[in-house]
Amino acid sequence: MPLPTPHASAPLSADPHSHASRSPVRVSHLVLELSVDFESRTLAGLATWQLANPGAGSELVLDARDLVIEGVEQTGPGLAASAPAAFELGPADPLLGAPLRISLAPGAAAVRIRYRTAPGAAALQWLVPEQTSGSQPFLFTQSQAILARTWLPCQDSPGIRFTYEATVRVPPHLLALMSASNPQELHATGTYHFRMDQPIPAYLMALAVGDLAFAPLSSRTGIYAEPATLPLATAEFGDLENMVAAAEQLYGPYRWERYDLLVLPPSFPFGGMENPRLTFVTPTILAGDRSLTSLVAHELAHSWSGNLVTNATWNDFWLNEGFTVYFERRIMEHLYGRDYAQMLQVLGRTGLDHTIEEIGPLSPDTHLRLQLAGRDPDEGLTEIAYEKGCYLLLTLESLVGRPRLDTFIKEYFARFSFQAMDTATFLDYLRRELLDREPGLEAKLRLAEWVDGPGLPDNAPSISSTRFAQVEAALARLAAGTAPTELATDTVEWSSHEWVHFLHGLPPALPADELAGIDAAFGFSTSGNAEVLAAWFPHTIRAGYQPAEVPLRKFLLHVGRRKFIVPLYKAILATPGGAGKARQLYAEARANYHSVATGTLDALLK
Ligand code: BES
Ligand code: ZN
């Protein structure tokens, strides 16, 4: 097997969330063999790691959490074919897992680890057929932020990249997919081969197994979904190729060959996950009218911000998400116009204000540069990185103009492709390429305040939306006593974004009888749009509005998307007698949720 060239990287700050990040010896390529056993809910693996710089030390350190390590061998010039390697699993931290230290003999060029996952491995969700739309079991992974180590012994730091190839064995009638080159058809043998020739960090390792079918959209894009969902999904994402083309036009070539989407069962805990070549998405964006596809633009944008230029540690998360939100809205503007993108920006602002209030306007967790050492990154990674990060770029845009900002961003992606980036290095680059070229520019931007200061600096441009002006007019009429039914002519053209803005703008404590009038006029309780439902239910929960109880219950039992369900449980908790109700619902729903959702909800509901 040819050894690929190691991927050079500049010295960056150490990663507090990886034992492996302090290993002088780095991995460069993975050859993975996996067997997927639904009965025991385990993966049995043989992971061969080729080393980038084997001479750099006498041991290799990997991250491992809840893995059973069955044996380790080493290979290389001068070593026997299967020379055992001494290894030691250090003390396990509940969050970080254990360092797996492997002693390297002189000449060792690769190590081979035989291992097994635990049935409760945090990255994995094993679904029974009832949790899918078909009659087969399903498995998917969610590795970001630090869960890859629960299904693969690896150097689980976003600053460490590797290429991979994999052979995965699954029950014969199921399809396996990875963040790699993918099959488009079932193989009768149940054995699938994958290659990822572009180096990626471990948090982008992904696997899904289920009764899945493929439909092409263009020569390089397509959709994977359960057969029952595929027609709806292909219609919803009909603009996928246009999105990729728009993104390329903005910030340079798409570097990952194919771009496919995998629509997961509804328990998927996120809206989307940017697994390279194969974005994972929640089925809750299948609204039937393409209204929620900005989420796809977001995950696609990560093919540049995040997957090409990668946050060096989770403290630098805003470099992934802030750029991606800005880029997402540029794609949407390109395809659907300024009015459309403005709506997304205002909705983002509402979310940001809410998050700042929730975290506390002076909290260091509202800084762009985070300090997450010793904490679960899952708790510190908030909407701040997304929306405040985007606002920093909007502020820069307002100062230098779009053409200069676009050139800067395009060159940034080109210059640092397949490399990690930390905040300090980014600031240096920004100064060198943009700020230092114009006296007073950095002072106008107030860069330090943005990066290491709390809240939203008041030089952020204020964004307003012409389409939302109509929503605000309708809200004003409603507040002045106009009957909801009389608003019908104002609202005929509204998309779900206008409706969500409308629901955010309703008085927070409307009594049940008023909600009944609104519901009768607009049919919120029976909406097929998950964003609309998620914005409606808090009102109905606070008012104890009975007719929404069945749809709410159905939603919580069916949907596992954390962004939706956590606020709903919080709203139920906040009502009189709500603790019992919330716990009872959760007891019924919990088996349908992924560990990242139960992690949050267990803490909330005790
Ligand atoms: N990469 C994130 C999801 C993520 C972040 C998983 C941190 C684990 C830790 C993904 O790109 C994302 O941001 N998804 C959002 C949707 C987006 C449109 C804001 C989500 O899932 O809600
Ligand atoms: Zn994202």
Image (cartoon, grey):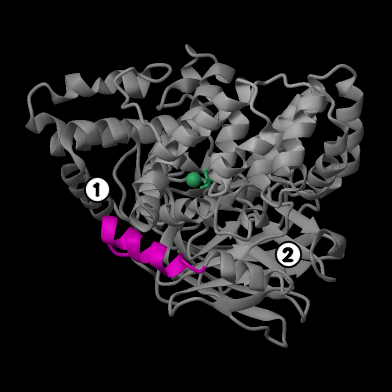
Viewer-side label of 1, 2: 1
Residue shown at 66%/57% (left/top)? 283
Element marked by disc 2: strand
Residue 95: % across, % down: 66, 34
Residue shown at 86%/29% (left/top)? 582
Element marked by disc 1: helix
Q: Residues within 10 Å of mark 2 (few under 14, many from 20)?
A: many
Label 1 vs 2, first from the N-terminus: 2
Q: Which residue is mark 2?
A: 44
- Residue 26 or residue 262, whichever sits in front: 262
Q: Which residue is mark 1?
A: 412
Q: Residues within 10 Å of mark 1 (few under 14, many from 20)?
A: some
Real-space Cα distance between discs 1 and 2? Answer: 40 Å
- Residue 313 or residue 287, whichever sits in front: 287
With 14 as the anchor, is 63 left or right in this view?
Answer: right
Q: Main secondary structure of the magenta part?
A: helix
Mark 2: amino acid: Ala
Q: Quadrant of residue 183?
A: bottom right
* Residue 249 within the magenta-colored segment of the rendering: yes
* Residue 373 within the magenta-colored segment of the rendering: no
